[in-house]
Image (tube, grey):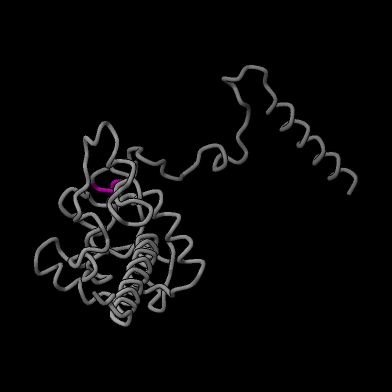
C-alpha cells in the first residue's frame, strides 16, 4: 500500500514538473487535449468536417420560413412571436387582407404608456405629439419638409384606417413615410397603433360632443 502511494506521488510530481515550462512555445504535456483544442466550430470559420458542411461554411442560412424557437416576445391572446413573419404581401390585395387584422394586445395602461413613449420617439417628429401633422420636422429649415394635412391622424381617410391597415403601413411604408419594420418590432408597433387609435377615438368623441352642444344651443335671435 505504501509502495503504491509513493509511486502515485512520484507520477504526479513528474507530470507536474514536466508540464511547467517557461517557454510559452512549449506548454508541456497535454493530459486533457480536448480542453486545449476545442472541437466547436467557430462562427464564420471554415468547417473541417465535409460530411456535415459540404460547402465548408460553418454559419449556415436558416431554412426559409423558419423562426427561432421560443425566442422573442410572445404577446396577446394568440401568443404571437416577435419573430413571426408578416404574411401579407406588398400589394393592393395584401393591404385589403390586412384590413381584417386586429391588435392582439390587451389595452392596458402599461401598453398605452409604452405606445405613447414609442410614438413620441418615432412618430411625433413628423406627425406631431397630438397627431396634427405639426411635428418639429415640419418647421425645420424654414419649412423645408412641410407636412401636408394628410399626415394628420384626424382626416376622414386616416380615421377610417383599421388597425390592420396601420400595421401594414408600418411594415411597408406609405407615400413619404418609410417602413418601420426595422426600427420597431411587431409588439412595439401594435402598442403605437393602440395609442394612435386612442387619440382618434378621443378626437371623434370630442367632435360628437361639440356637434351635439352646438345643436342643442339656441341661436341668437335677430
Question: Which segment is the magenta one?
Answer: 50-54
**Quadrant in which residue 65 is drawn:** bottom left
The residue at the point 62 percent across, 31 percent down is 29
The image shows residue 135 at horizontal and vertical percentages of: 32, 46
Q: Quadrant of residue 141?
A: top left
- Among all residues in the image, which is located at the extreme right? 2
Q: Which of the two residues, 40 or 199, is positioned nearer the viewer here?
A: 199
Q: Residue furthest top?
A: 23
Which residue extends farthest bottom?
216
Q: Is residue 130 above or below residue 221?
A: above
- Give the main secondary structure, helix, strand or loop, of the magenta stretch: loop
Residue 3, x across and y down, in percent: 87, 43
Q: Nearer the viewer, residue 107 or 150?
A: 150
Give the image location of residue 210, x and y in percent. Answer: 33, 73
x%, y% of residue 68? 37, 61
Left of 100 or right of it: where is 113?
right
Q: Residue, x 29% and y 47% (percent of image)?
A: 126
Q: Nearer the viewer, residue 38 or 14?
A: 38
**If the image is split into quadrants, where does the C terminus sit?**
bottom left
Residue at (25, 32) in percent of width and height: 142
Q: Could you tell me how many numbered marks the image carries?
A: 0
Asked if residue 49 lies in the magenta stretch, the reply is no
Please tell me whether residue 53 belongs to the stretch shown in magenta. yes
Amino acid at each position: 500500500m505504501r509502495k503504491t502511494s509513493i509511486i502515485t506521488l512520484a507520477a504526479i510530481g513528474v507530470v507536474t514538473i514536466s508540464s511547467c515550462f517557461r517557454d510559452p512555445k512549449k506548454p508541456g504535456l497535454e493530459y486533457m487535449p480536448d480542453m486545449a483544442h476545442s472541437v466547436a466550430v467557430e462562427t464564420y470559420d471554415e468547417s473541417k468536417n465535409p460530411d456535415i458542411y459540404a460547402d465548408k461554411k460553418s454559419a449556415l442560412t436558416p431554412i426559409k420560413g423558419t423562426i427561432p424557437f421560443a425566442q422573442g416576445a410572445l404577446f396577446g391572446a394568440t401568443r404571437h412571436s416577435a419573430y413571426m413573419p408578416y404574411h401579407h404581401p406588398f400589394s393592393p390585395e395584401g393591404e385589403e387582407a390586412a384590413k381584417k387584422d386586429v391588435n392582439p394586445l390587451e389595452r392596458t395602461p402599461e401598453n398605452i404608456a409604452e405606445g405613447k413613449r414609442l410614438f413620441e420617439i418615432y412618430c411625433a417628429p413628423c406627425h406631431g405629439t397630438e397627431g396634427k401633422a405639426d411635428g418639429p420636422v415640419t418647421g425645420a429649415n424654414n419649412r423645408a419638409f412641410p407636412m401636408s394635412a394628410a399626415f394628420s391622424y384626424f382626416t376622414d381617410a386616416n380615421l377610417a384606417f383599421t388597425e390592420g391597415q396601420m400595421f401594414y403601413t408600418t411594415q411597408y411604408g406609405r407615400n413619404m413615410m418609410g417602413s418601420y419594420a426595422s426600427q420597431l418590432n411587431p409588439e412595439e408597433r401594435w402598442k403605437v397603433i393602440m395609442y394612435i387609435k386612442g387619440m382618434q377615438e378621443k378626437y371623434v368623441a370630442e367632435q360628437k360632443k361639440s356637434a351635439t352642444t352646438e345643436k342643442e344651443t339656441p341661436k341668437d335671435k335677430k
